[in-house]
Structure formats: C-alpha cells, structure tokens
Amino acid sequence: MRIRATVAAVSGALALSALAVPAAHATGDSGTPYTLNASFSNVTIAKAIKVGTTNEVSASYSYTLTHGSDVNIAASDFYSDAYLYKGSYDTPTAELYGDNPATCTATSATTATCKGTVDIYPADGDLKNAWAGSWGVAAEAVAFNGQNQDNPADMSKVGYKDQSGLGSTLVQRYSQLTVNAGPEPVGKGKTLTVTGKLSRANWEDHAYHGYASQPVKLQFRKSGTTTYTTVKTVSTDSYGNLKTTTTANYDGYWRFSFAGTSTTPSVSAAGDYVDVQ
C-alpha cells in the first residue's frame, strides 16, 4: 500500500527505506549510509485529522527542505517525505506515511518546498483506538546516488537524513451527534423532551459506538435568528445517549453540541425544528 523501497545493508543488520528509514544511523564505513547534508523546517499540516471507520483520509503537508550543493533533489533516486509518529521518536508506538513521496520544487540552489500527503486507511487496520490524540511530525530524505535501491552495492554512497520534533497534529476518532425534540408541535410553556446520541469511530471493529460520560450542550436558536444559545449542559450515559427536558416558549431549532476532546473532534447535531403553539 505504501511505497517503501527497502535497501538491504551491506554489513550489520541496518536497513533503510526510501520512505521509512529507522531514526538513527551510523556513518563512516562501507556498510552504513552517510548523513545527508539536509534539514527540514516550516512544516505545515492540519491541526487535527479526523478519521472514521472505513474511508481513506489524506492529510496534506508542506515543508522547506534545505540541502547542500552536493545534494541533487532532481535525481530520480532522491526521495523525501514527512510522516507522523506516535509516542517517542526513537521507539514509536506507530507511524503513518503517505502512499507516495513528497514533490519537492526548488526555490533556490539549496532550498525547496516539498508537498505531500499522509494517507490513512482505517479499514485496513492503520489505527488502534489507543493511538487517538497527539502525534509528532518528522521529515526525512534519502539519496541513493545511483546505487541499486533494492540492493545497494555500497551503502556508504547512500545518504540519509531524518529530523523529528517538527510539529504535531491530532489524529482523532470521527464523531457523530444526533438530536430529536418532541412532542411536535408543542404547547407554549409546555415541557419539551430532547434526546440524542454522541458516538465516535472505533478503529478496531470499524463501527460507531456511544461516547460515555461526556458533557454536551443543549442549544436553541429562535426562528428567524442565526445564533444558537446554550440552555444547559447534560452528560451522555454509558451508551452515549442523551436525554433532557426544557420548556418550549418559541418556535425554533434545538440541537446538541459537543466541544470535543483531544481524541474526538467537536460536533454539533443539525437543528431539529419545533413548532410552538
């Protein structure tokens, strides 16, 4: 699924990938790559990546690649990309890459703007629920310099550089929220019952399940206006269900609104119109 041109090391157990190379590399002998004269900066990526149960999600990124005059970024065997890692960079819990390397466009003799995507396939098991939340951003570049990418004869001619701590993003379990207010119509000053459910994607069984014990705002928008006002805050039960009562005084729209957490994005239900007679 992801392009990973793996290179077997000439000596030792070291292995490289054009798109996923381990974080630390020695230098100085025929069995190890040299440190490529390159660095990465100005990384941009979405603050949050919302991932559901089945659909592929692609998050665009860009960064500045600065390199030495000896690095030919236009070579067919030069690759660079940005990727995400969960937990410690040296011993990550998980990593997320793009299907293709970044496209780097020179802006000077020694700088380039690189653009690409991180591609996530929840239906293929790319994610576990425990991995929701903050991920670090890293970037890398490899120059094979004419060596066979599948089996380089001289690893010391292959250059590699990686850099962590370039930013962060949230990878979140997509959320859904429903609302139903009744009875409809309702008498002025009478009790209105509002129900709904807050659920979020489960990346392991590929279904949506209720999000328990979460504060959710009940909001009202009077007919003819554009702004919702919070009436009260209620909590979801152990199944993610919501139920509360309020007094109906005006025609208008009722909805639930969830502020979100680091693992689950904010979401508001579509307003349910109630006619007050």
Image (spheres, grey):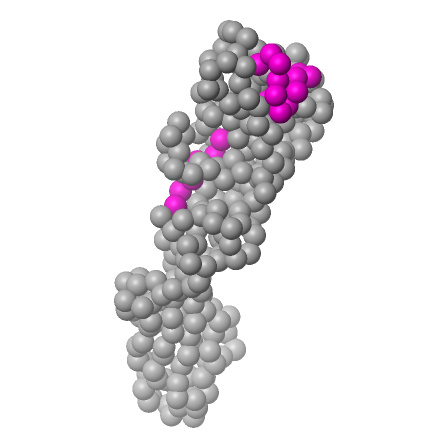
Whether residue 207 is situated above or below residue 164 in the rendered picture: below
Kindly identify the residue that appears in the image at 33 percent across and 89 percent down.
190
Number of marks present in the image shown: 0
Which is nearer the eye, 227 or 241? 241
Residue 219 visible in the snapshot? no
Residue 208 image-quadrant placement: bottom left
Which is nearer the eye, 252 or 113? 113
Q: Position of residue 262 (x, y in %)?
A: 37, 49
Q: Is residue 234 left or right of residue 26?
A: left
Kindly identify the residue that appears in the image at 60 percent across and 29 percent down.
5
Q: Position of residue 91 (x, y in %)?
A: 38, 30
Please provide the residue range marked out in magenta.
Answer: 131-155
Whether residue 136 is situated above or below residue 38 in the rendered picture: below
Whether residue 160 is situated above or below residue 266 in the rendered picture: above
Which is nearer the eye, 141 or 15? 15
Kindly identify the residue that appears in the image at 36 percent across and 53 percent down.
261
Which is nearer the eye, 150 or 221? 150
Residue 133 located within the stretch drawn in magenta: yes
Image quadrant occupied by the C terminus = bottom left
Image quadrant occupied by the N terminus = top right
Q: Position of residue 183 (x, y in %)?
A: 39, 88
Kindly identify the residue that appears in the image at 36 percent across and 77 percent down.
195
Q: Is residue 76 left or right of residue 126?
A: right
Residue 229 located within the stretch drawn in magenta: no
Q: Position of residue 108 (x, y in %)?
A: 69, 21
Q: Is residue 147 left or right of residue 179?
A: right
